[in-house]
């Protein structure tokens, strides 16, 4: 059984640079008081043990042993450690993704998946089989780094590559079905714009989106439906509903706080919206979830 070294975990700050193709570290922390920050590279964070909360952009996720997060370039994030946590970090650059080191046929597809990962609630591992695959991969990386045996660098690179591809496979499972590596760059930009501004309803009104991207409302409607398989309004409604569900399940935010966060006029407005989507009020949804209702 491997043993992690006790090292101080310094959260990378906004001006942090990655001067190597990739870097690996294993760190134990009782707390992580650093303010939210961003950096210019990808960062995979695996929780070997412990628990707490991970804040990324405007989302907050509970974390525990076995959870894996991908921080993409320019994401704002921080960790709040509640129980002493053993972290595994793999940091790699976009240059590494594009290099021949990964030795896969469709580098463009891999790059697209990683760059356009959006933050769904919880761990990014969606494939149950992969959940049992990732930990042994990371434990093997730990051993190779600590033992420094013959051909350790070659083995480490192969393990890093395997981990990146496993992550990409899981991310691909929740990308919009109609969006692929051959899709028009503009639809990806539109989706990113909507996700970034989902908390400000005025900014995602059709006329504002059209003005931002220099297109007509008729064109936007046809274009969005063609590439996403649903209307813009349907996409916004479904995305917002999933975020509200996450708040109700995994945060202690009051209903009034959720109203303010998502730009509803009042609790009645939120209740009406949520009932239309899920058939019950937000308060009832939270109660049923806390009571272990399997249908929620």
Image: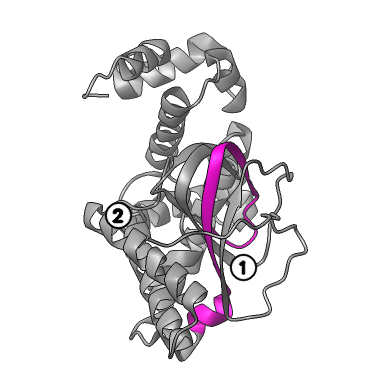
Q: Is residue 87 magenta?
A: yes
- Packing grade of label 2 (10 A; few <14, some 14-19, many >=20) is some
Residue 158, given in percent of the width and then of the height, sits at 39, 81
Q: Which mark is residue 131?
A: 2
Is label 1 in a helix, a strand or a loop? loop
- Up/down of 96 relative to 130, above or below: below
Residue 116, given in percent of the width and then of the height, sits at 47, 61
Q: Are marks 1 and 2 in contact (CB under 8 Å)?
A: no
Residue drawn at 50 percent across, 65 percent down: 115
- Up/down of 257 relative to 12, above or below: above
Locate residue 270 relative to residue 260 in the image: left or right: left
Residue drawn at 45 percent across, 76 percent down: 144
Disc nearest the viewer among 1 and 2: 2
Residue 59: quadrant of the picture:
top right
> What is the spatial separation of the Cα atoms under label 1 and label 2, in whole angstroms?
24 Å
Q: Which mark is residue 147?
A: none
Q: Is residue 206 magenta?
A: no
Residue drawn at 65 percent across, 41 percent down: 31
In the image, the segment drawn in magenta is: 71-98
**Residue 205 appearing in the image:** no
Front residue of 78 and 57: 78
Residue 175: quadrant of the picture:
bottom left
Image quarter hosting the N terminus: bottom left
- What predominant SS class does the magenta segment belong to? strand
Marks 1 and 2, the one that precedes in the sequence: 1
Residue drawn at 46 percent across, 57 percent down: 117
Q: Which residue is mark 1?
A: 41
Locate residue 249 relative to residue 74 in the image: left or right: left
């Amino acid at each position: 059984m491997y043993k992690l070294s006790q090292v101080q975990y310094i959260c990378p700050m906004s001006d942090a640079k990655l001067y190597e193709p990739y870097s690996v570290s294993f760190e134990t922390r009782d707390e992580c008081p650093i303010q939210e920050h961003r950096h210019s590279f990808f960062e995979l964070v695996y929780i070997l043990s412990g628990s707490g909360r991970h804040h990324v952009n405007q989302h907050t996720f509970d974390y525990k042993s076995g959870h894996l997060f991908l921080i993409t370039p320019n994401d704002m994030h921080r960790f709040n450690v509640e129980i002493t946590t053993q972290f595994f970090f793999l940091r790699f650059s976009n240059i590494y993704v594009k290099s021949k080191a990964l030795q896969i046929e469709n580098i463009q597809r891999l790059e697209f998946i990683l760059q356009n990962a959006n933050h769904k609630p919880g761990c990014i591992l969606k494939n149950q089989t992969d959940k049992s695959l990732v930990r042994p991969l990371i434990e093997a990386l730990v051993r190779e780094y600590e033992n420094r045996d013959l051909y350790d660098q070659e083995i480490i690179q192969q393990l890093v590559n395997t981990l990146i591809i496993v992550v990409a496979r899981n991310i691909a499972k929740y990308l919009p079905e109609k969006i692929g590596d051959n899709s028009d760059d503009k639809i990806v930009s539109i989706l990113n714009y909507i996700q970034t501004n989902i908390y400000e309803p005025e900014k995602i009104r059709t006329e504002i989106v059209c003005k931002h991207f220099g297109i007509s409302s008729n064109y936007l409607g046809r274009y969005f439906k063609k590439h996403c398989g649903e209307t813009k309004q349907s996409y916004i409604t479904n995305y917002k509903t999933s975020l509200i569900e996450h708040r109700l399940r995994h945060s202690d935010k009051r209903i009034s706080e959720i109203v303010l966060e998502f730009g509803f006029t009042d609790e009645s407005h939120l209740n009406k919206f949520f009932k239309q989507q899920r058939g019950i009020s937000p308060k009832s949804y939270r109660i049923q979830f806390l009571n272990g209702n399997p249908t929620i």
